[in-house]
Structures are given as C-alpha cells and as structure tokens.
Amino acid sequence: MTTALAPALTPTHLRFLEQLFPGEGLVTKPEEMAVFGADSSRRSALPWAVVRPRTEDQIVELLKWAEAERMPLVPRLRGTGMSGGAVPAFGGVVVSTLWLNRVLDINAGDFCAEVEPGVVTAEFQALTQKQKLFYPPDPASLKISTLGGNVSTCAGGMRAVKYGVTRDYVLGVRAVLPGGKICDAGGRTHKNVVGLDLTRLFVGSCGTLGIFTKLTLKLLPLPESSATVLAAFPSLVAALEGAKGVFRAGILPTAMEFMDATACRGIAQIKDVPWPDNTQAVLLLKVDGSASALAEDIIRLEQALSRANPSCLLKGLGPKEEEPLWEIRRLVSPAAFQLGPDKLGEDVAVPRGKTVEAVEGFQAIGAENNTHVACYGHLGDGNIHVNIIYDAADEGQRTRAKACKEAVFRLTLSLGGTISGEHGTGITKAPYVSWQLSETERELMAGIKQVFDPSGILNPGKGWV
Amino acid sequence: MPNVKHDDTHDAKTNDTFDAQNNEDVNGVPGAKAAPAAASGEKPDAASNGNSNVASNDNSNANHNAKTNAKPERDCVLCGCCLELCPLFAATNREELSPRAKALLSGPSKFTAATLDDDAVAELASLCLACGKCEKLCPQGVSVPRLVARLRAEHPDFRQWLWKQWVTKLQPCWSLAAKGAGLIPEALTPANLGLALKGLRGLRPDNGLRPWLTVTRFPVEEFRQQYGERPVVLFDGCVGSGPRKAWGQAARFLLRGLGANLAEAGFSCCGSTLGVAGLPEDQLTARRANVEAWRKADRPLLVTYCATCRKGLADYAAPGAGAGIFANSDEEALWAASVTPLSGLLSGAAGKVGRGVPTVVGWHRPCHAVLPGDPGDADCKLMSSLLGARLRTPAKANCCGFGGIMQLSAPELSTQVGQACWNGLDGALGFTAAPEVVSAYVLTGCSGCVMQLTATAPAGHGQHAQVGHWLEIVKTD
Ligand SMILES: Cc1cc2nc3c(=O)[nH]c(=O)nc-3n(C[C@H](O)[C@H](O)[C@H](O)COP(=O)(O)OP(=O)(O)OC[C@H]3O[C@@H](n4cnc5c(N)ncnc54)[C@H](O)[C@@H]3O)c2cc1C
Ligand code: SF4
Ligand code: SF4
C-alpha cells in the first residue's frame, strides 16, 4: 500500500499548499518544523511540510488533493502521545489541527458538549465545571493534551475504574476522509443503534481513518466533593486483598491506584513517607459524591481496608486534605530515576482478577534479569505501569531491559491481557501487535482501513497496519 | 524515502532507514541513552490526581517541582509538561514557539546539525518571553530561558546591541524620554521599537495613577521584632529610579512607616534583562557593582518592589550566576537572605480607601512574582488584604508578554501575548461587558508588566485602561 505514496513534496505540491494555507498556515523551514516531527515517545522525523488549517473547508480541500496526489498526511495536535502516533516516521505533511480549538457548545439540558479537536482537556473540564457538569476522562496529561488527541488515542486515566475511558464519553465524531468526504458519525443522543458504530471506530484510531473536525462529548452531573484514603501493606497480597475488600463492600472508588515495593522505595529516597520501612505495597483510593455521603463512605472504606491489616492508613476529606496524599502518587514517575538513569515505561493491562499474578510475575521477571522493575498504576482497572529501570550506557543492562520488556509482554498476553491499555501501539509497539492480534483480526482491521483510506495516505505505518 | 532521525545523536545505530524492529526501545531508541523518560503516562505534576471537583487552572502548584526536583538539569525528554503554561504558545498555538521546541532545538537531542541551520535555530529559539513558567513545570530541570540566553549570547546580533543601548545607555534619560517621546533618539529606533516606546511613553510621570489608599496601621512591632535596627536599603531598579520616581517615594514612605532604619546605596540595573538578552558579561558587571554597593552600605536588608528586579537579585546567589560576585559563601547566603519584597514586610498592615477608588481593581500577577520557596505572591496577598473583594484576579495568571528583547525582535508576538493577557483580565473584571460600571483598572508589581500592559491596553469603549504599580495607589501625605 505504502509503495504507491508520493515519495516527496514537489515544487508543484508546495505551491498548492502555499495557496491553501497562506501566511503562518504553512511551515517549511526545517528549524520550525522540527518540533512537529517529534512527540513524547521521543521518536522524531522531519516533516516534509507542516500545515495549519483554520477551517474545515481547508481540510476538505487538503484531503481531496492528498488523495489525488497520494500524499501521506500525519494529523497532529499537541504531540504528547507516548507511542509516536504523531511522528511522520514514513514521511509526509504534518497537519497541525491546533487552530481548530473552539468549544462550540456545552449544554446542561442535553448533557453534552460539542468541541473542536484542539481544545485542551483540562480547560474544557474547567468550563464544564462552571455549569456543574463533569467530563470524567483524566489522562495524567490532561493539562497538556487535547480532546482530539484523547479521542484519537482513546486516552484513559485514574478515574477509569468508576467512570471508564475517553471512549465512554464520545457520542459523535465529525471527520474529513481521504478524498474530502465528511463523515458525521453518531450525534447528540446518548443512545443510538442505527447502523454500525462508526464513532467507536474513530475513537482510538490514531489519525489513520480520518481527520477530526468536531467531537460530541457526553457529560455527567458534577459530584459535590471527594475523599482519599492511603493504606500501606506489608505484602502485595495483603494490599490486593484490601482492594478486593473494597469492591466486596460494595464501594466503587473513583480511583484506585497502587505502588509496589520498588516504586515505594524510589519515593522514599526523595520524600519523607508516612509508611513503615517494611512496606511492600501502597494503595491510594478516592471516592466522590455528596459531602454527607462521603463522610460515611470513608468510614466504610477504612473498615474494608482494615480487614487486610494495613500497617498505616491515612485519609483526607476534600481537595485540600487529599492533595498531599496524591502528591505522593505523582512522585512515582520521577522517583523511578532514583533507581537508575533510564527507563522503559510500559502500560500493559490485564483482566482485573489477574492483577496479583501479573504484578508478582513482573517482579519475578525483574529479579531474574537482575533489573529494577517498578510496578504501579491503575489497580482498579488492571492497567499496570511497568517501569523497567536501567542504565542505557551499559550494553548488558540494555539487553536485559529489553528481555524484561518482552517477558512482560509475554506474561501479560498469557494472562489474557493487552500490551497497551492507554498509550496505543503507534510506532513504538507496532512490532509487537502481531503477538496479540491474529492474522484474521489484523486482516479485518486492514480491510476497514482500506474502506476509509483506500490509498493509505493517513498516518501510514501506525498502529496495527 | 523514510526519514526517521533518531534524536540521540550518540546512538551508534542511528541510520536513515526506519526499521521498527531494530528501532526497539532498548536497542536503538532515540533518547534511550540521552535521558530517562520523564513520564510513562504519569504526569509528575499538578492536579491530575483523579480529583473530580477542583477547577485547578491557576498555577500556584507550579512551584512544587522546585521543591521536589532539587536535581541537576538533564536533557529534555519531550514529555511536554512545559506546554501547560507557556504564554507564547497559548496565545499563538504555534508549536514552533513552544518551550519544547526550544528545548528540542537547543538541547543535545536536537536534529543533526546537517538539517538545521544554527543561526535560524538561534533566531527561532530567541522568540521567548523569559517568563520562566516552563522551567517551573519541567520534571527534568530544563531551563529554557537559560538555554535561550545561551543561544542569544552565542549569536549576538543587532537586537542585543540595541537592547544594551536601551538598558545601559538610555536608562539615565528614561524619565526625560518618557516625558516627551520626541527626546528619544529616533535614529536608534527602527520600526520594531514601536511597542517598547509605547510602553515607555505610558510611564510618563504624569501618567501615574491617582493615590486613594491610606495606610492606617503599619505592622511596626512585627517589623521591629524581626529586623530591629538592621539598616534597610531600597532597590529601585531602572523604572523606579527613572521615569517613575514616585514608586521609590511611596516605598520609602512605607518603610519609614514601619520604623525601618533607612539607608541608601548606589545600585545600578539588576542585570536580569541583560542576561536574558544574551549579554552575560554586562550582566556580570552589573551584578558585581550592585553587590559592591550593598557591601559598602554594610550589607543591609535589601528591599525590592519590582518582582523581576527581585528575581534578578535573587539569581545572584543561584548556581551558575557567575564568578567573583561574592567574597565567600557566607556573603552569598547573607545576600540571598537579605533580598526581600516590600509587600512581605507590610503583611498585617491595614488601610482605608478614599475618594477616587474604582469599583473593582484587577491584579496582574507578574510571572516572576513567586520564586522557589515563596509561600505565594506577597504583593497580591497584601493587596487583597487591603482591598478585599474589590481586588479581582484572573483564574489563570497570564504573562503580559513583555519579554525584554522580544519587544524588539518580535513585537507582534509580544503584542499577541499582551492581548491574551488583557482578555484574561477582562474576564475577571468585565470592563467590556459593563463599561459604564467597571473600568479597566489594573495593578501589578513589576515594572516590565506596567510598561507592557500600558502598551497593549485595549482602547475603545470611550475609556482608557489605567495600569500602575500598586505603590501608586498609596497616599504618602
Ligand atoms: C506526561 C504524560 C502523561 C500522560 N498520561 C497519560 C494517561 O494517563 N493516559 C493516557 O491514555 N495517555 C497519557 N499520555 C499520552 C498522551 O497524553 C495521550 O495520548 C493524548 O491523548 C495525546 O494528545 P495530544 O493532543 O498530544 O495528541 P497528539 O499526540 O498530537 O496525537 C495523538 C494521535 O492523534 C492523532 N490526531 C491528532 N490530531 C488529529 C485529528 N484532528 N484527527 C484525527 N486524529 C488526530 C495523531 O495522528 C496521533 O496519532 C501521557 C503523556 C504524557 C506526556
Ligand atoms: S523542556 Fe522539560 S517539560 Fe519541556 S518537554 Fe523537555 S523535559 Fe518536558
Ligand atoms: S520562558 Fe515563558 S515564553 Fe519562554 S518558552 Fe518558557 S514559558 Fe514560553
């Protein structure tokens, strides 16, 4: 498919782009383009050109032209993706859609909002909160990434255990397809079963099916307040037993995060920690709801956790008291560098009941390979961040780290899990997709891609194809 | 055909063919050696904590990195954490102007030199307001303003020269110049100087705000307990010793009210604008001269009323400040402990508003208002304790876009950021929505901000915006 694509930008191509994107709408100086070729995966490739549409009409014209010219296009927003989704690894014109950044509508009656893709997630959430509405998806990057990027990668977050991920809040997607047709998938209704669910296909498609110009998002009423409990345990099993106890007690936390012994050790090196030395795992839970109900919920939460004999238990009611507890959680990632200068960050997910087995297995893999492996993350939904810490300057360590990573993937898959719960496969995990998806599934996906994008001009080489 | 460049130029496996299998994270990954990934889906910052109920769009949490990341500067890992608050990026949505672009271009992980032109890189990276917001957010300790200053120093051109004239040569005639713009040597002023000139004209002494706040109680006892008879000097800075002498007068009035043992010292420019403009030698000269003046005055308490001057002075004791500024580490520590904002000394003061007080007053928080270790913006705290609900602060502390040399090199960008800042102030004050009731009246605590906000103030609605330092509202009679 890719062989038929245009191999470079000709002067004629450039003239076309100059006309369609006047002024700062077209970027061609390599110095200015450099950043558009990289993202948070730390991969990079110089774009052939960068264009910045201000209107949907420009995108329609662009896609008509690109289809005719077999011109590869790489849609881009803020480039915070972790798997190289926005990197023009196989060449092409980068389409920065950051200038499409209006919030078109926030409607408390319909519980829905219409936005352009370039709106920053946290800024949108702040706007909804003013109307006592709630858009739950909360990737850790919510202040630096966009709704369009979140939809395109189906971003997850800490609240997923209770509220689900981005996918669960996308009611409609308007996208321009190669050739310039506009597809209006879904709409403002919260239910809709007419035809196949094209909206879902767009969510998580990593810019391979169409270029979004508008998203319709579902909103909830804003919970009044929240509360947090931190509990430390002398063994991983006890911690996970505590977590189970919470669900058994009928409590559905907003967030349920955990950190294993290695992660805790890292934090203890940069901060005074409240837990005892022999701590093997720490749980952090958040509940939300009305202020009166929360006072009771937190007592129930404490009781449920107490059955697993935590060695320390702290709680906070309301954002002010909760903040210091979550500060600890946010230190995990930087703290990992206390154990070594480099790390591989994987984001595997396993069926929720398999979390103990998975974490114990990952720790064993670390021990076998004589490598620090820190596990932490979204215990509530089985999405585990596995940080493999090493020193890249040392060839032996590099090899061992890679061995660890592959062993982690194998174990994950053997437990019925997935090699990526949040970040997507992009270019960094593309080589491993075939470990998880069979020929049949991959063929089906390729067929779907073919229908949307027969010439393969949209974000070539990404994801599963 | 494929054109993947690894961003780690030391990587032996770098080649021009993209091969996903070979390009495995461990073996050939760009940056695998250069630096650790800051985040694997974990933003080590901010209120991304699963908290459903707080609109957390102020940047008061930005400082935590300063505390938690007491670590040396590492290479940029492209995590993008710095994108959150960059005013230039926010006002333009042009990624090439973002701090990440600057870090990518000037850091060791840049694209191979063959593809990028050094001068063009320096020029692009130079488009920075030096507000420092990115630096506070960076988990790797990357300081973009420092990278930019370094690049500017390596690629001096006419703008540096111009700025140097501006700061060092023109400074004595600022008050003159501000009185009548005709006195500014036009020969020195290419078209780009327009914005800076506008700001300067706004500083005309007769353009100041009319005072309406009487201080009725000074925290004399608190001051005496903490500082006793220790001598106190005031650092006036370029504007306070030039076109707006009234600031210095009000500040001295307040210090006398506190019962301070006032002394004087002959200070020059704090040097921060010089450093940012890429003139490290001139900066060092200014620093040494100021420390010498302080020494001569018997190392007194050093009181400031401009946020940027204060940061400029505090930076003398920062790592990499330059050799030979201080006699020894004790002196350096004493300096660091002596630089104090005036507003902090006045905490606990009471006041009374008089005739001429506007219905609402906007507060513009200067980017440099909160330094690492500060509990908050002392100026804003003082003003809100004195003015109560009358004082309105935009939810997001936007940068005014002053940016020193950027006023000369890219006035249109500087203006764009200024306009975004005014939009934020309008949101908090509502002068566009209800011009009959509310005026665009804004106080701040930094001379650069006063200049820039004056230069970019919205005209129209039959009224002119009024901008000033908070010292201007204090009655001194
Ligand atoms: C510190 C940090 C923390 C993170 N935490 C999380 C986390 O908790 N959970 C999580 O899931 N992810 C996380 N991420 C990953 C990242 O933030 C998300 O993938 C985010 O959704 C990307 O948004 P973006 O605006 O940066 O989009 P980009 O990275 O620019 O693009 C993402 C994808 O969308 C495509 N795209 C861009 N524009 C369009 C368009 N107009 N139409 C169609 N497709 C388009 C691109 O081609 C690309 O494939 C984190 C990243 C960082 C750096
Ligand atoms: S400068 Fe710092 S915050 Fe910005 S992308 Fe680089 S490492 Fe991240
Ligand atoms: S110093 Fe300010 S303007 Fe410059 S890159 Fe950083 S945040 Fe942007």
Image (cartoon, coloured by chain):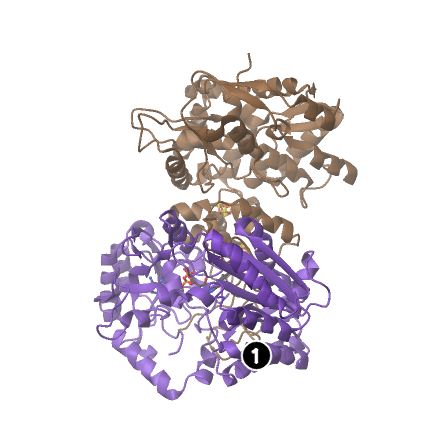
* Residue situated in front as seen by the camera: A44 or A17: A44
Residue hosting label 1: A358
Residue A177 in the image: state x and y as whole percent: 25, 68
The residue lying furthest to the bottom in this view is: A439
Residue A207 in the image: state x and y as whole percent: 35, 68
* Residue situated in front as seen by the camera: A62 or A309: A309
Q: Is residue B203 above or below residue B282?
A: above
Label 1 secondary element: helix
Residue type pointed to by label 1: Ala
Question: Which quadrant, please, contains the C terminus of chain B?
Answer: top right
Q: Is residue B101 visible?
A: no
Decide if ligand 1 comes within 8 Å of the CB at mark 1: no
Question: Residue A101 vs residue B44: left or right?
Answer: left
Question: Residue B340 vs residue B368: left or right?
Answer: right
Question: Residue A210 vs residue B275: left or right?
Answer: left
The residue drawn where x is 32% and y is 60% is A217
Residue B316 in the image: state x and y as whole percent: 67, 38
Question: Which quadrant, please, contains the N terminus of chain B?
Answer: bottom left
The residue lying furthest to the top in this view is: B477
Residue B199 in the image: state x and y as whole percent: 44, 28
* Residue situated in front as seen by the camera: B416 or B55: B55
Question: Residue A315 vs residue B384: left or right?
Answer: right
Q: Chain of mark 1?
A: A
Query: Which shade of the palette goes to chain B?
Result: brown
* Residue situated in front as seen by the camera: B279 or A349: A349
Q: Is residue B258 above or below residue B322?
A: above
Q: Is residue B395 visible?
A: yes
Q: Residues within 10 Å of mark 1 (few under 14, many from 20)?
A: many
The residue drawn where x is 33% and y is 80% is A445
Query: Which shade of the palette goes to chain A?
Result: purple
